[in-house]
């Protein structure tokens, strides 16, 4: 029974963080064009437009106080998975020539706070793996 509640809480917490991340990016003047885009090779949390750049945003969050902890969880394997998902998404929609980048948005939700602490890592990593030529 506890496991079922954990999965519900984890899903709720993730959706809450993605909504807060989208709100943060919109305050910066970005346009959100996609959320939770499921591709066969992975999921793109947020897809946003910053000026003339299409930004793939990976959202990470924690219930602690340090946003660097969830940001550090975007390791090489996760970068490779995001690159593959981005390539599949872009190729299916004929966007391979579009200027793009990867950002990581880490949110820390300290207990008792209504708003998270946000760490925004622009250009967090370059495309990883054999498809890096399309960055």
Image: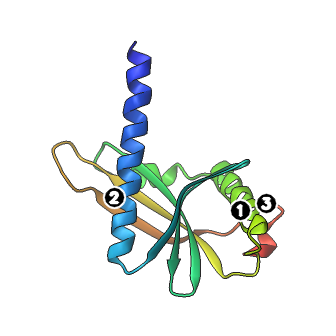
The residue positioned farthest toward the right in the image shown: 130
Mark 2, residues whose alpha carbon is within 10 Å: few (<14), some, or many (≥20)? some
**SS for callout 1:** helix
Q: Nearer the viewer, mark 1 or mark 3?
A: 1
Give the answer, above or below, for where 31 lies relative to 64: below
- For the point 58% across and 82% down, the residue is 53
In x, y percent, where is residue 65? 28, 49
Which of pointers 1 and 2 lies earlier in the amino acid sequence? 2
The residue positioned farthest toward the left in the image shown: 112
In x, y percent, where is residue 120? 42, 67
Determine the CA span between mark 1 and mark 2.
24 Å
Mark 3, residues whose alpha carbon is within 10 Å: few (<14), some, or many (≥20)? some
**SS for callout 3:** loop
- According to the picture, the residue beneath numbered tag 2 turns out to be 20
Give the answer, above or below, for where 24 lies relative to 75: below
Tell me the quadrant of the picture where the C terminus can be found: bottom right
The residue positioned farthest toward the top in the image shown: 1
- For the point 28% across and 48% down, the residue is 109
**SS for callout 2:** helix
In x, y percent, where is residue 117? 28, 59
- According to the picture, the residue beneath numbered tag 3 turns out to be 129
The residue positioned farthest toward the bottom in the image shown: 52
Determine the CA span between mark 3 and mark 2.
30 Å
Left or right of 111 on screen, residue 42: right
Q: Quadrant of residue 82?
A: bottom right
Determine the CA span between mark 1 and mark 3.
16 Å
Left or right of 34 on screen, residue 39: right
Tally of marks:
3
């Amino acid at each position: 029974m506890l496991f079922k509640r954990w999965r519900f809480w984890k899903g709720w917490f993730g959706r809450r963080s993605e909504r807060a991340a989208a709100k943060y990016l919109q305050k910066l003047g970005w346009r959100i064009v996609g959320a939770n885009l499921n591709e066969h090779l992975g999921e793109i949390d947020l897809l946003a437009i910053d000026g003339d750049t299409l930004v793939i945003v990976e959202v990470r969050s924690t219930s602690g106080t340090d946003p660097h902890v969830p940001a550090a969880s975007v390791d090489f394997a996760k970068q490779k998975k995001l690159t593959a998902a981005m390539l599949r998404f872009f190729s299916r929609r004929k966007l391979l020539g579009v200027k793009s980048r990867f950002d990581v948005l880490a949110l820390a939700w300290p207990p008792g706070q209504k708003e998270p602490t946000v760490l925004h890592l622009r250009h967090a990593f370059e495309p990883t793996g054999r498809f890096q030529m399309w960055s």
